[in-house]
Image: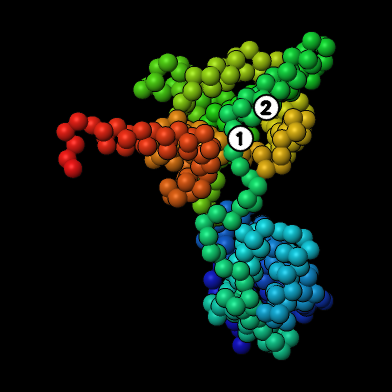
Amino acid sequence: MGRRSGVPGSAALHLVDGVALLRPEEQVFAAMLDGWRAQQLARNLAFTTIDKRLNVVRAFAAHADGYPWAWRPQMLDEWLGDLRAVRRLHRSTIRNYSTCVAAFCDYTTSPAYEWVTECERRFGAHPVQVVHDWNTAVHVQDAEGDPARRAFTVDELQTLFDYADDQVARARAAGRKGWLALFRDATLLKVAYGFGLRRTEVAMLDVVDFGANPHADEFGEFGLCRVRFGKANKGSAPKPRTVLTVWSWTMEVVEQWVRDVRPLMPAGPGSPALWPSERGERITVSAVNKRLTEYRTALGLGPGLDFHSLRRSYVTHLIEAGWDPPFVQQQVGHEHASTTSIYTCVSSDFRTRTLRRVLDATMQAAVRPGRMA
């Protein structure tokens, strides 16, 4: 009896009925992965999200040394324990991995996709859900990141930017061609901080992504930055947003780069990218990380200051300067105000000034003439 054609991702669409398989276990597992990919594509999930999920499932299968119809919860326990104790992965990463495996098991055990019937017929066993509340980590707090990660202080930022500028000056004075790449990277770091951008967001900027803000003429043609590759929500496409320029120095560094220095880059005139590479059209995220790590090490700054610390600093310094929190939230593209609050690492000096201001106001109110007893 023939099987029904099924929905995207069903066994009937990925295995030909009546055809013998040379390596049945391997081929059925591959068909399952193909089916899950098709099912996720039908849900309009991003390609990058799907590929990461598939890789996680492959990694679990390799550790379990077995196929989905032979998986058991104990195998997941061992895998997650290994990730935590041996590989030292972060809690949030481990939880994301278990979520991927759970989603795959939901797919393979759903009657709509017929994998249970297919596996019973071929192997005498069927997939089961191996991820449960009792064998996975719970999400108990909003911020699960590395506690060592923090924002730059104003002095640390100034030191970083001064050091980056010094590298440009030295290379240029020595007649080295590398000064253009150093100038690019120094400007990129300043732009990442000046607009509160993530690594991919800043790396994927094009020259045309800057424009005038009709409500802030003083910034000229660089009054806003259109971020086209913002962080996606739940596997969707990149989330765009527009970030308004808030500091005049930001406009100045971008304008100098675009008009005076970028055209000198080998790929500059023919590339739409704001940051062309010496060997290609666009700088890579790994190159961005490498440069910051190099400067951080040279300055003796701790590993808690990573590229994302520039974004933390942007949020922190705006809040310290008295900018409205909802405005800051929209600038950085946070869906919830609670996320922005996690990024806010107000300095001890700021807290001291705030406390002193409130105490002084309280004392003035207490001694004000005519105060009621």
Q: In this image, 117 relative to 280: left or right? A: left
Type of amino acid at the residue the image marks with label 2: Leu
Q: Nearer the viewer, residue 92 or 3?
A: 92
| Residue 204 in view of the camera | no
320 to 266, vertically: above or below: below
Q: Quadrant of residue 304?
A: top right
Q: Is residue 1 visible?
A: yes
Q: Relative to 17, is 316 above or below? A: above
Q: What is the quadrant of residue 117 in the picture? A: bottom right
Q: Residues within 10 Å of mark 1 (few under 14, many from 20)?
A: many
Numbered tag placed on residue 152 in the rendering: 1
Contact between labelled residues 2 and 1, with CB atoms less than 8 Å apart? yes
Residue 153 at x, y percent in the picture: 59, 33
Q: At 58% across and 29% down in the image, what residue appears? A: 154
Residue 79 image point, x, y percent: 74, 70
What SS does tag 2 mark?
helix
Quarter of the figure that contains the N terminus? bottom right
| Secondary structure at numbered mark 1 | loop
Task: Identify the residue at image location x=68%, y=31%.
Answer: 282
Q: Residue at x 57, y 76 (%)?
A: 133
**326 relative to 2 in the view: left or right:** left
Instruction: Identify residue type, mark 1.
Output: Phe
Give above or below for 192 relative to 117. above
- Residue designated by label 2: 160
Residue 253 falls in image quadrant: top right
Q: Is residue 92 above or below residue 320?
A: below
Q: CA distance from mark 1 to mark 2?
A: 9 Å
- Specify few, some or many for label 2: CA neighbours under 10 Å numbering under 14, 14-19, or 20 or more: many
The residue lying at 55 percent from left, 46 percent from top is 231
State the mark number for residue 193: none
Q: Nearer the viewer, residue 13 or 232?
A: 232
x and y percentages locating residue 209 in the rendered image: 52, 28
